[in-house]
Image (cartoon, helix red, strand yellow):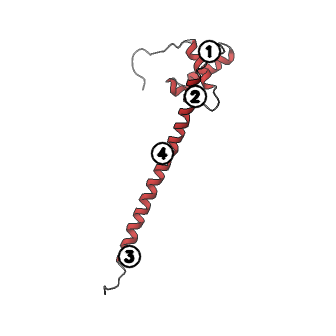
Amino acid sequence: MPRPGPRTTYKYTEEFKATAVRLSHIPGVQVGEVAESLAIHPFMLSRWRKEAREGKIMTRKVELDREVAAELKELRKVKKAYERLKVEHDLLKKAIAFTSKRKTMSSLSSTNTGKAPQ
């Protein structure tokens, strides 16, 4: 539900827009990741990319900081590794629970064989 009152709109500089567009053109980096890291909506970045293609935003004169580009790539790798580790962790938790349950069941069945103790 939208908040009552006047709507907040942000004005971004042409340099910011151009830098965002250049970042989104780095091979291996997705538009959504760039938008998330810049705290903007992915649709806005897509619109800026379209404006850059049409020549409304000049991206040629903006120098892309190599450190920022490298950091974005590294962040993407770290996020992928984190997601993989979460899946592995959940799988291991399930495996431990399964084997623990099985061990408990087998120990209970081995003690009750129905024979009288000697």
Provide the secondary structure element on which disc 1 rests.
Answer: loop
Mark nearer the viewer, 4 or 2: 2
State which tag comes first along the sequence, 4 or 2.
2
Can residue 11 be seen here? Answer: yes
At label 2, which amino acid type do we have? Ala
Q: Position of residue 89 (x, y in %)?
A: 46, 49
At label 3, which amino acid type do we have? Ser
Specify the label residue 110 is tagged with: 3
For the residues labelled 3 and 1, the Cα–Cα distance comes to 74 Å
State which tag comes first along the sequence, 2 or 1.
1
Q: Position of residue 116 (x, y in %)?
A: 32, 86
Residue name at image x 55 percent, y 33 percent: 74
Residue at which label 4 appears: 86
Residue at which label 1 appears: 62
User: Label 1 near label 2: C-beta < 8 Å?
Assistant: no
Residue that sits furthest to the bottom in the current view? 118
State which tag comes first along the sequence, 4 or 1.
1
Residue at which label 2 appears: 70
Question: Which quadrant holds the C terminus?
Answer: bottom left
Residue name at image x 51 percent, y 28 percent: 36
